[in-house]
Image (spheres, grey):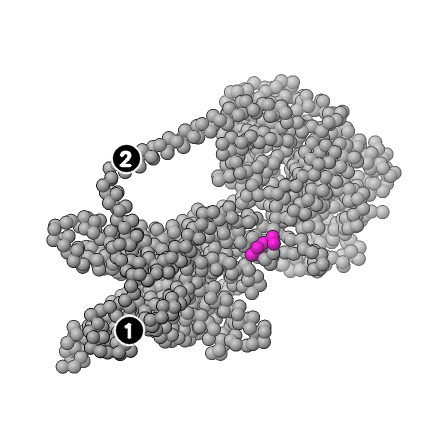
Amino acid sequence: MRSGSRKNYPLFFGTILVLSVLFIAIYGPEIAPRDPYMKVSLQVLNKVQGLPYQAPPYRPSADFPLGSDDLGRDVLSRVIYGVRYTLILGAAVAFLRLILAIPLGLVAGWFRGWLETLVRQLAAVFGAVPSLLLSFLILRVMFVPTGRMGPNLSLTLENSVMLYIGVLTLIEWPRVAEQIRARVTEISGQPFIEGAVATGAGAGRIIFRHILPQLGPELVVMTALEISRVLLLVAQLGLFGIYIGGGVYEEIYPGEWIQLTFYPELGSMASDVRRYLNVAPWMVLPPALAFFWIIGSLNLLAEGLRIRLQRFSERTTIGWAWKSLVSFIKTHRRRLVLAAMALGFLWIGYTGLAAVFHERAVARVDRTKGPEILSRLDDRQPGAEKHPNYARAAARAPRYRIDGKFDPAQNRFSGFVRVDLTNTSGAGWREICFHLYPNGQRKDSPLTVVRVDVDGKEVPFEVQGEILKAPLAKPMNPGETLQARVDFEVIVPPASERFGRNEFAAWFGNWYPILAVFDDRGWNLDPYSAVNDAFYSDIAFYEARVRVPGDYTVIATGVGEPVTVGSEKVFYFRTDLVRDFAMVVTRGHTKKSVYFRGKQINYYGYGKTQSQIFEAANLAANSLEYLSEAIGEYPYKELDLVDVDFSPRGPSGMEYPGIVFIGARLHPGWAPRVIVHEIAHQWWYNIVHSNQAQEPWVDESLTNYTTTMYFQAQNWSQESRYLGYMEDRYRSYIRQESLKKAASEAPLRDWELDQVVLSLSGRQVRRDPAPKPPENWPYIIAKPVYEFRDGREVSSLVYTKGVLMFEDIRRQLVAGQMLNFMQEYYRRYGYGAARGTDLIDTMVRVGGTKVRPIFDRWLYTDDTDASLR
Amino acid sequence: MGPLGSGNLRRLGLRLIKLLVRKLTYLCIVAFSVIVFSFIPAAFVFTRTGSGFTMGFNWAKYWEAVGKYLETLVSGSLGEAVRTWTRGGRPLTYPVADAIEKALPRSLTLLGIALTIAIVAGVIIGLNGTHSKARWYYGILLGGVLAFISAPDFLVAMLSQRAMILLQSAGLKVLPPAGYGELKYAFLPAIVLSLVPTAYIARVTSVALDGILHTDYIRTAVAKGCSERQVIYRHALKNAALQIIDSFPALASISFSNLAIVEYIFYVPGAAYQLMVTRGDAYLTAGLALCFAAIYFAVDLLVNILREFIDPRLKEVAT
């Protein structure tokens, strides 16, 4: 009825729309304005609007063209990335269905018989329950938390992808097979097939030469429809919280878990529909419209193709293309196979050769440019060597070389650490020991020692938990040197800890085999502690070579320089005398630098606005300068501050020499304290070291006091009230603890207890005098880190009571004597390790014997009346 | 002899019995597979290992649970679902049949209204689409049908809900945007629910008529001098009706999916809502899924029986 001259609009528009979808799917990552994973946890607003900060989801604005989602990620970018991932998902499922269905459909359609019955029955059975309900029944097991086990049900990504694709394929392929079977049966009734049968053609020949060419163009239509069908199902499942990566939960409050939408996939974005429809419509409309656009264009294309097929069943472009392709393949079958094999071999050879050549290029660069770069790099601040202990420390310091390659796809760093060391102790060594801190942080032992060499010879070694022991063939006498090399592999754990990673960065803190300290206690083998830091190491020189993919940057202790070799970047680093070597491998941080009197302070932030990052860098520069003036010159040229993911219950910041990790999700009012605290650690952890495991107060209390001192010197209106806050906090801790103790005698349920504590904390506590603590609940600071029950106890005692102690001492001293103490302490124990007694002795030298009882009272007694007088 | 003579009646009865047996067999297979799927979650065993959990599948426990459920079914009840656990770890239960009894009428009301709208509107739109010569009408029809088939259901649902909320905040209470109570609460979900079936039926009607209008007997009818109206309503529609009715089981299947979405977004505590929101309980899940399977087969059976009476070819074979 409709003539052939009529324009086929569906085909025209369908093709254009499908091309637009493909364009976004292919070039999306280049178009997307922002990183789809990047979370902006707080946004600075105009102060005119009242609140200075706003939490996500943000409304559409210049920063976020389509607004942001509930975690502060750009909706537009997520949709653009989502088109790619979701289309791949849909296509994979559709192709799998067709691959299963086509052979069965063809065979069943041609031979009929029991196969036909089987296909029809299968289709009837699977068709009876709607595919949404059926896939939901199976998939909900994997994705939906059940009861108390809930949050831990998450599968690995690979498993969940396989399961998702598998289930979506299996539940609908019988229907596709039935469709094809019906069509084949229809075709085989036609005269030209009867003719072929009459000529005596076999089944294979008829299927391949006569039925398949007839079916081919229709299969194209079917594929498009199938993809659109799968996508519709993906959208519907997403609405009910079933999507790839849907097993990831985060505990936002003890006992309260929310399902995270992690991957930028449209199905997962659809899961927000019901929660956010009326709160943040900008979050849910774009993904829904994207689904509409993709499914609609596929359906339109399929419709257009169908019309075209109906009109000229023979002369369609697709039919023609299909036929010529088939005939080409048939005539050149043998040559094609040979060519494919040749190409395959070439490809294998090429990739193999390319890898070999790449390795050789890296080695060549290392030979030629490496030494030159390393000799050029110098992190020493002019005048740093004037420190009285510098020369002696430099002469005895071990020299480390860390060398390896980080593979972000596997999250694996493999390489070696080589250390030249001298026995500077008075005793002979029968073995040398290394800490493997990653194996203490994680139960699953992410660090594997591959081999240990001493002086170039492989030796047997022994790994005891987080300690590596390499026995020496002959005892190493005092003054002797040796070279040890440990080849190791370490998997960066998916943790929000000192050593961890997120989607775009991996941060390496306490991550490699580091030499244990040998002193008069023997080898210090104190294990990793989850509560506070328990790291103790000798000061040393480091050289490092780190290989990463070209789009990554490495930020590390010391100063560095990259060389690009092919698709890789090779970073060289060299440090002055430092305690440790930490680094961050990233492709998602924004850098702001401040140059200040020969020092370079870099702040690498994410999830913050440019001005926030700049403000943080300025604060860092300011405090670094102040502390350099007050205590002694910062000995290095560079200081890096890097935002990393720390879990709310983990550390808020972590100090390493020349590089500092700052929790990216800190409250903006709290962040300045953390920044200054970690910078003060450059003096009271790095230059003047102490055994953090045995005497945590020596560095932490002093560092926190120094922080307070900086803010008071700056006369920050809020921060200078900090001492009062410390006092309140310490008292409320005592109050809560004694309440708990009282409650433990008359047992209450945990939550009731929390209620009591909650209702009693705050103002009421400040007015009441602190109650006497119960017996056997010592509030003493000076104890090993392992004696503290939890982070709260450490923060209330070491970080709070310790500050009050120093403040109490300051009030007994003459003005300026506190600074004199710090300078003296820094001068005497710099580039070495101090003990608590050393600190007290120094203070006594400066302030007289009257300070000793004050130390005793605060440190070793649980005298809770202790307060500032 | 008329089409319903005694011999015919016997043959018809025989065919109907055969049909019934076949459909019941299907129902049993489907019911069994639904039960098998529903009890998968209960059989996963999680053991704590260090920082996380490892997952295992306990086959013995699984078959035991399935067997127990089948026993319950045989004894004529749908079992008891767990509402909550007491502090002592004792389950507080309620009969699944009660839950279904409460929820199912709501779902059926929605479905009933929606399908009525869909059949009436769909057939009218489809018929007009065919015999109207206006190209723009055909274009709009095709576009509209494709749009409704392509739009994820929740897009339409959430847009209409949002529209109602905006209207209500502007002071116009047209239809309640969510919830369930009197009949007026059912209209908005039902209208949204009817969109896809309407598009579907319109499309089936239009395609069916398109095909039929090319056949010889229509050409004969036109040659006889029948008006277009006569041709369509007398000759073509009867044949098209067959194809429309044939599409009902598929339509039911699609509508169940959409029902879940519509109930979820409009907060209608119906059966599909229960099924999707019930996160753990295998008895409730299995009961509801069985319920849907039964409805599907009821529709399927009905369609097949209707066919027997409508299809002129079947009658010819019979006489």
Question: Is residue A653 in sight in this rendering?
Answer: yes
Image height check: is A567 above or below A256? above
For the residue marked with disc 1, what is the amino acid? Ala
Q: Specify the segment rendered in magenta.
A: A62-70
Chain under disc 1 = B
Q: Report the disc number at residue B241.
A: 1
Q: Report the disc number at residue A216.
A: none
Residue assigned mark 2: A338
Dot 1, how many residues are within 10 Å of its Cα: few (below 14), some (14-19), or many (20+)? Answer: some
Question: Is residue B289 in sight in this rendering?
Answer: no
Q: Position of residue B50 (x, y in %)?
A: 52, 45
> Which residue is rendered at x = 36% and y = 66% of the image?
B253
Image height check: is A621 above or below A95? above
Q: Is residue A192 left or right of residue A417?
A: left
> Which residue is rendered at x = 32% and y = 69% of the image?
B206
For the residue marked with disc 2, what is the amino acid? Leu
Chain under disc 2 = A
Q: Position of residue A259 (x, y in %)?
A: 52, 55
- Comparing A858 with B87, the one in front is A858
Q: Residue furthest front?
A: A5
Image height check: is A321 above or below A492? below
Residue under disc 1 on the same chain as residue under disc 2: no
